[in-house]
Image: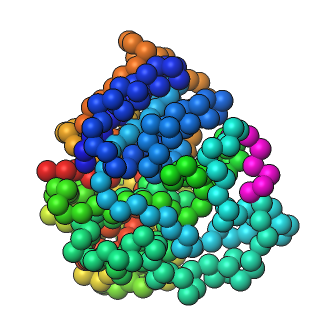
């Protein structure tokens, strides 16, 4: 990473002045700007136009603010050298029924960012529905790598960063097949239907997209990177257990026993109401353990005491032999996420923010018009992030409020 900053500003003018200074201090010509922006809809056009004029080579998206700064404008920026790409590989389709099919949106034709009213009416974004794609969007296309990456050798790519819609399974599968030993970190862009009229809003070299993914592949010569995850606030329900059989997204047996009954017994032991597994105030998880730490996390979506199976919010449950714990996230009125909590320099962090952060704006937290944290890139989204660390791990997603993934340059 050549240079990075995370900027929190009270006003668009303060943000633009900071971006001007970042541009003046950036000496690397030909590099690509990575940015994530959270701002009121009436300021988006002027800010994105400013970014586009200073950095014509860019990949970016709209993000959500961290709770501590939700009444401010946030923009994380980083300059990187690598191979940029645009992917249209489909992921899992969101089920659609009834007459909602007729309103399905498509963004196969990008909207030029040079238009004077980029964030005005998006009526031209509606397209005809391909019914076969609705039922099987990944068939025949999951291994079709973006054209920009087809000449890259696996040894030429150490880490891959991308911004994606809420269905990254297609691009993640293609990257795993082609670059199995790389680290892969994807940011699931914030939902923007009430901001820009698009499901998500992605930016790539002057174009605006509503789906797919845009990203950059980094080379080993740019420095060694490590990818770590944190899951603050989780409470252990069980000690470490071993998964003895699993399939699909199901855990079938744990320590050769019934996993759902283990979960219910642990809930009762901790004073939780085991009669209602789908509690509104708590979320339950399976954490895959490594050296006593949670290295991978999956939310429990359902359980069956008679059959014993536990269903996870993933396409691939941990394999037999994996060590796991059952955990839960207590209800919290506020999640303390701030820039200072991401330690160290030369790092890039993606954070899963809460779906709902309250109706009342917090008190201002800035003593000045702008706060600039140098050396780190921090972006949040309620849709979370996805990651993979090398060949031994399958790509997986996290939406745990407060969960974060951090790519660190050493």
Q: Does 341 lie within the magenta span?
A: no
Could you tell me residue 288's position as x and y percent?
A: 29, 67
Residue 267 horizontal side relative to residue 113, left or right: left
Viewer can see residue 237: no
Residue 11 horizontal side relative to residue 235, left or right: right
Task: Tally the marks.
Answer: 0
Residue 19 falls in which quadrant of the image? top left
Report the front residue among 335 and 301.
Answer: 335
Viewer can see residue 130: yes
Q: Residue furthest front?
A: 29
* Above or below: residue 391 compared with residue 25: below
Residue 44 horizontal side relative to residue 187, left or right: right
Q: Residue at x 49, y 64 (%)?
A: 86
Could you tell me residue 410's position as x and y percent?
A: 14, 50
Residue 265 falls in which quadrant of the image? bottom left
* Above or below: residue 352 compared with residue 103: above
Residue 209 horizontal side relative to residue 101, left or right: left
Q: Does 123 lie within the magenta span?
A: yes
Q: Residue at x 31, y 74 (%)?
A: 152
Q: Residue at x 71, y 47 (%)?
A: 197
Q: Residue at x 39, y 54 (%)?
A: 328
What is the span of residues highlighted in magenta in the rendered image? 119-125
Could you tell me residue 276's position as x and y percent?
A: 55, 59
């Amino acid at each position: 990473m050549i240079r990075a900053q995370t900027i929190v500003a009270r006003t668009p003018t303060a943000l633009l002045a900071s971006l001007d200074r970042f541009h003046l201090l950036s000496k690397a010509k030909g590099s690509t700007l990575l940015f994530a922006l959270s701002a009121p809809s009436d300021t988006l056009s002027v800010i994105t136009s400013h970014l586009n004029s200073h950095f014509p080579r860019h990949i970016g998206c709209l993000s959500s603010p961290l709770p501590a700064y939700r009444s401010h404008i946030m923009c994380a920026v980083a300059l990187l050298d690598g191979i940029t790409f645009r992917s249209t590989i489909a992921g899992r389709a969101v089920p659609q029924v009834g007459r909602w099919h007729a309103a399905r949106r498509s963004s196969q034709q990008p909207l030029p960012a040079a238009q004077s009213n980029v964030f005005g009416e998006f009526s031209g974004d509606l397209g005809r529905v391909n019914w076969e794609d609705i039922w099987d969007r990944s068939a025949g296309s999951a291994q079709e790598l973006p054209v920009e990456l087809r000449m890259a050798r696996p040894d030429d790519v150490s880490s891959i960063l991308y911004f994606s819609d809420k269905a990254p399974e297609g691009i993640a599968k293609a990257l795993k097949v082609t670059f199995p030993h790389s680290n892969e970190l994807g940011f699931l862009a914030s939902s923007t239907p009430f901001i820009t009229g698009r499901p998500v809003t992605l930016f790539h070299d002057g174009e605006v997209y509503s789906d797919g993914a845009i990203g950059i592949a980094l080379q080993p010569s740019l420095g060694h990177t490590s990818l770590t995850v944190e899951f603050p606030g989780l409470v252990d329900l069980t000690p470490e257990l071993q998964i003895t059989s699993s399939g699909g997204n199901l855990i079938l047996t744990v320590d050769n026993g019934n996993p759902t009954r283990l979960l219910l017994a642990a809930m009762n032991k901790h004073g939780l109401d085991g009669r209602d597994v789908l509690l509104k105030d708590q979320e339950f998880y399976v954490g895959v353990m490594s050296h006593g730490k949670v290295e991978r996390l999956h939310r429990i979506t359902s359980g069956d005491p008679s059959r014993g199976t536990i269903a996870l919010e993933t396409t691939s449950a941990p394999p037999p032999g994996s060590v796991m714990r059952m955990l839960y996230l207590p209800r919290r009125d506020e999640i303390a996420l701030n820039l200072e909590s991401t330690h160290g320099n030369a790092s890039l962090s993606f954070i899963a923010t809460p779906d709902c952060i309250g109706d009342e704006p917090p008190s201002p937290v800035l003593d000045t018009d702008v706060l600039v944290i140098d050396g780190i890139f921090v972006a949040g989204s309620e849709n979370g992030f996805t990651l993979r660390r090398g060949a031994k791990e399958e790509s997986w997603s996290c939406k745990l409020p407060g969960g974060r993934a951090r790519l660190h340059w050493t």
